[in-house]
Image: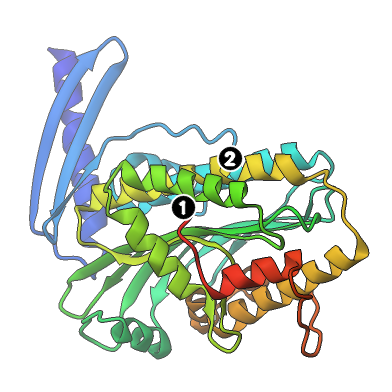
């Protein structure tokens, strides 16, 4: 009997504390509170509180996270990530911390020479990030894997950009939350492609109190020289990840990728594509999250076999020179057209070192460079000017 009274007291305290913490969040309207199950067993007591807000329900289950292999302490306090692990923004942060660590550890293993420099930073306007950079490795000339967890008020330029994409958000001062993982890898060997991936989650609260949320992201490959088997493997791996959720996703997001990573002034794509999507919010939130997690988990299987296959290939000065010219195209896209770069630079308190991490250590521009007819260089340019269906 005494044990039961203790459990009920803890339940009441937990619910009161959680209710109080949400009341303090001015941008949310509290609609309903219910307290759920109490169970007693050998392992102890489990208390679950449910909070209904804007037609969404969050469960606070206190799930323990294995953070032993993460690159750093998370931006959000670990206890909060565990206590509110069913709320999407905290669930997403835990996932990207895992992805960052898995990618960094695997790249270190493949490189065999260099380790990632870990820079955990905070942002006075709210939140922060963890930037992990490897440079001058035996295999990877530069690799960066960033996570960011930021919040504050959207600047007018960012609001205008979102409204231009069809986001009907009321008000001028809009609180936002954004979290994501972003990675760019520039290998040393010209026969190993560069890769980029980014998976992110946004929340914006307008003046009516409505929460707008969406996911975005993608993975794309930029080879310097074309290996058709590599292209098929890369796209087939991404297609398999998409097909687990919908057969419509891969063709739709593959086409979107070809159209997004395009340099109009060059008349060519940045690479051989992959998948790209934004404003993903039409399905239930949990389904969107599961899809994004599948795509993020597909990055290493899509890429590492290609790296292992080519990292010891021989190459000449001519091939290295072509690699630097193609990297110049990469820089052009990121600085002129990339929406993520623009959003980052427009955000108050932007951390330019992390935003520009995607740029290679070395690149080159040559006046009116034209590849020789019937050369390997001309072959890749033809593909970039006319994207193919690989699977």
Residue 241 relative to residue 336: left or right? left
**Mark 2 packing: few (<14 Cα in 10 Å), some, or many (20+)?**
some
x and y, in percent, of residue 94 in the image: 44, 45
Colour logic: rainbow
Q: Is residue 386 above or below residue 285?
A: below
Which of 320/105 is in front?
320
Disc 2 vs disc 1: Cβ atoms closer than 8 Å?
A: no
Q: Which mark is residue 76?
A: 1
Q: Is residue 380 above or below residue 2?
A: below
Which of 91/81 is in front?
91
Estimate the spatial distance between the alpha carbons at disc 2 and disc 1, rounded to whole Å.
19 Å
Name the residue beneath numbered marker 2. Answer: 102
Residue 72 relative to residue 254: left or right? right
**Badge 2 or badge 1: first in the primary sequence:** 1
Q: Residue at x 25, y 81 (%)?
A: 166
Q: Residue at x 26, y 48 (%)?
A: 246
Query: Could you tell me which quadrant the N terminus lies in?
Result: top left
Which of 270/362 is in front?
270
Label total for image: 2
Q: In which quarter of the view is residue 29 placed?
A: bottom left
In the image, farthest residue toward the top? 42
x and y, in percent, of residue 193 in the image: 68, 56
Q: Residue at x 20, y 81 (%)?
A: 207
x and y, in percent, of residue 379 in the image: 67, 66
For numbered disc 1, what is the local secondary structure?
Answer: loop
Q: Is residue 381 above or below residue 114?
A: below
x and y, in percent, of residue 269 in the image: 55, 74
Of tags 2 and 1, which is closer to the observer?
Answer: 2
Would residue 299 be seen by someone viewing this image from the given angle? Answer: yes
């Amino acid at each position: 009997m005494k044990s039961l009274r203790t459990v009920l007291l803890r339940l009441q305290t937990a619910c009161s504390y959680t209710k109080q913490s949400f009341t303090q969040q001015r941008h949310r309207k509290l609609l309903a509170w219910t307290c759920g199950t109490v169970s007693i067993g050998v392992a102890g007591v489990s208390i679950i509180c449910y909070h209904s807000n804007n037609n969404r329900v969050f469960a606070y289950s206190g799930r323990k996270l294995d953070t032993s292999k993460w690159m750093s302490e998370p931006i959000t306090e670990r206890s909060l990530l565990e206590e509110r692990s069913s709320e999407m923004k905290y669930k997403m942060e835990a996932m990207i911390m895992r992805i960052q660590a898995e990618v960094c550890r695997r790249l270190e293993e493949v490189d065999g020479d260099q380790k990632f420099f870990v820079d955990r930073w905070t942002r006075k306007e709210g939140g922060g990030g963890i930037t992990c950079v490897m440079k001058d490795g035996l295999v990877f000339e530069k690799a960066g894997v960033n996570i960011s967890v930021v919040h504050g008020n959207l600047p007018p330029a960012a609001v205008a950009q979102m409204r231009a994409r069809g986001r009907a958000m009321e008000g001028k001062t809009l609180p936002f939350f954004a979290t994501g993982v972003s990675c760019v890898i520039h290998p040393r060997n010209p026969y190993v492609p560069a890769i980029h991936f980014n998976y992110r989650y946004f929340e914006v609260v307008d003046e009516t109190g409505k929460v707008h949320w969406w996911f975005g992201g993608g993975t794309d490959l930029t080879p310097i020289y074309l290996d058709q088997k590599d292209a098929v493997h890369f796209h087939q791996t991404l297609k398999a990840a998409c097909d687990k959720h919908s057969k419509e996703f891969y063709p739709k997001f593959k086409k979107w990728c070809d159209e997004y990573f395009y340099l109009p002034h060059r008349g060519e794509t940045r690479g051989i594509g992959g998948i790209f999507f934004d404003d993903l919010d039409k399905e239930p939130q949990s389904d969107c999250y599961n899809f994004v997690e599948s795509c993020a988990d597909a990055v290493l299987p899509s890429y590492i076999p290609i790296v292992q296959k080519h990292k010891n290939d021989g190459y000449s000065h001519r091939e290295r020179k072509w690699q630097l010219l193609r990297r110049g195209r990469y820089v052009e896209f990121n600085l002129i057209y990339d929406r993520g770069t623009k959003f980052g630079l427009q955000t108050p308190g932007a951390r330019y070192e992390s935003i520009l991490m995607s740029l290679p250590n070395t690149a080159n521009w040559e006046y009116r460079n034209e590849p020789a007819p019937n050369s390997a260089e001309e072959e890749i340019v033809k593909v970039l000017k006319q994207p193919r269906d690989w699977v």
